[in-house]
Amino acid sequence: MNDMPDSERDAKLSSVYRAAATDEPPLSMDHAIRASARRAVAAHPRAVGMPFIKRWQQPLSAAAVVVVCVSLVTIMRDEGGVLTLTPRSKLPASSAAEPPNNARREGSEIPNIVLSDGRNRNLGLKLPEQAADRSRDRRDAYGLATPGSGTGLTPPRGLGGNPTAIAGDAQPAPRSAAAEKNQAASEALTFSASMDKDRQSARTGDMLASAPAPAMREAPGRLATGAPITTTANRTDRVATPSATASAAPQTADTRAEARALAGQSAAENAYAVSALAQLPPDQWLARLAELRRLGRHEEARAGLTEFRKRYPQVALPRAVLEGE
Amino acid sequence: MRVAVARGLTHTAAAMPADNLPTDELLMERYRDGDAGAFDLLYTRHKGGVYRYMLRQCSERGVAEELYQDVWTNLIRARDGYRVTAKFTTWLYRLAHNRLIDHYRRQGGRVAIYFETDDNPAHLEVPALRAADPAVGLDIKQQAGRLLQLISELPEPQREAFLLQQESDMSVEDIAEATGVNRETAKSRLRYALARLRAGMREAEK
């Protein structure tokens, strides 16, 4: 070093040494070493511009991970938007009485409890098989993918859209009588279609197993095969006492008659609703139609819209009225 | 850590990078990334120093050339793992030092372990002239020959410290890092080497 003290550097010695330092490696060795260096580069070529990529490799990787995570969270949040929390008090009484347990299955154990010192302890308790069946049936009826404590999946709007109505003991939403019947019929269909076959009557099971979901939405009052479906009264009975369905065979005729009557009632009520709408001025008529759409009462809205088009073909229809068409 | 500017080397004009020339560390990074031309420049800068370092440490030229070639071969192999954590010359001469130690070990453990201390006067003894020249006042060529003879008679650690200083313009800290010792040891080795060489040169001039 040039900044070395004199005790660590001797200029005279250095000058003498430089005079002596004339030895150089042989040219053949130079060529061999340079060739070896080129061969090494050729064997493992790396782009000269690699340092830029290497510098940005980790930041880019981290950014990609963040983007993927945010996307996943966003997607999961959007998909999870249909899940609504239903208070346990509004679930069926027998379901609400069960302890919150995510792991309950048929014959499954009650999961560990957490002791005060933080340790888990398995009580070795099992759910009674009948209770486990009942719990699973109820979960299936509500369309729950994963059993959860006090959570329920909101049915599609076309099928009623009010989970508390399914519970049977909940307060009904203020609606017209016809809408109530339509909703009850569709809910009964959903409930019954998901029940185990051994808990249903043979005819009811066959009838419901052949009912595709889109057909249910299109004609909630009837099955795709044209067979009538159960009534609200039967539905609530089954929710309270599933074993009652075992004696459903003698009642099938009555059920069909009731469903047929319900369908006829729906048509009559639609006609009545159309006539009521026809008495309104056009703007109020359209507003009412939009409200019916919003409430999911598409049958009434469709009937009213048909009549409106006949009477006022020159009026442009707002988008809210055309939803679901 | 990136070393900003390579220090100028001592003897060879080609080995002295001007301010507008790339540093040794940058050249080595370029070579690591696939630029063979960078290695050519790097080799041109340092080939003389490394060669003389080996030549002065070995008694036979053939052995020195073999070790010299091994040093550069090891550098080429290690290029993928090169990171700028110190001066390039320190890294290069560390490779040379390690190769030399390996050679000594294969020769039968000829590596002399010296514990230089200020109270160890044995290292201050000046080696006797093998071919004493009665003439007073040697010319530069004769002085150079005498110096090389004195260097060859130095204890190996002292010789190494002196050669590293002269060939690569290393500081005491760099010498310590290249040879794997602490700073005080490197400083002591260098001081004893200079003292012995000065004394030997004075004696030759008499």
Image (cartoon, grey):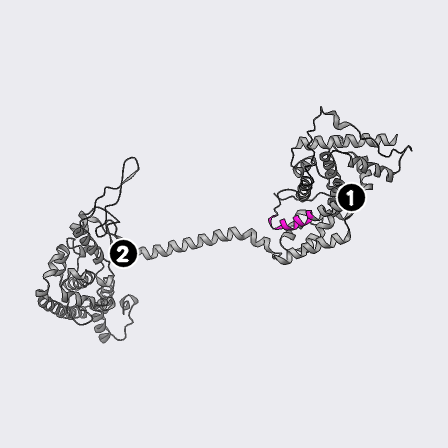
**Residue occupied by mark 2:** A145
Residue A37 pos. (x, y %): 67, 54
Quarter in which the C terminus of chain B is drawn: top right
Note whether A273 is above or below B42 in the view shown.
Answer: below
Of A257 and B69, the residue lying toward us: B69
Quarter in which the N terminus of chain B is drawn: top right
Identify the image quadrant of residue A313: bottom left
Left or right: A38 as drawn, with respect to A97: right
Q: Report if residue B17 is visible in the image.
A: no
Q: Quick one: label 1, few (<14), some, or many (20+) residues within 10 Å? A: many
Local secondary structure at mark 1: loop
Residue A19 pos. (x, y %): 83, 41
- Same subunit: marks 2 and 1: no
**Residue occupied by mark 1:** B11
Note whether B88 is above or below A50 in the view shown.
Answer: above
Residue A9 pos. (x, y %): 76, 34
Q: Which residues are magenta?
A: B70-81
Of B34 and A273, the residue lying toward us: B34
Left or right: A16 as drawn, with respect to A156: right
Q: Which subunit holds the residue at mark 1?
A: B
Q: Going 91% across and 32% down the picture, which residue do you hit?
A: B134
Q: Residue furthest top?
A: B119
Q: Main secondary structure of the magenta part?
A: helix
The answer for how far apart the CA atoms under marks 2 and 1 are is 81 Å
Q: Report if residue A144 is visible in the image.
A: yes
Q: Amino acid at mark 2?
A: Ala
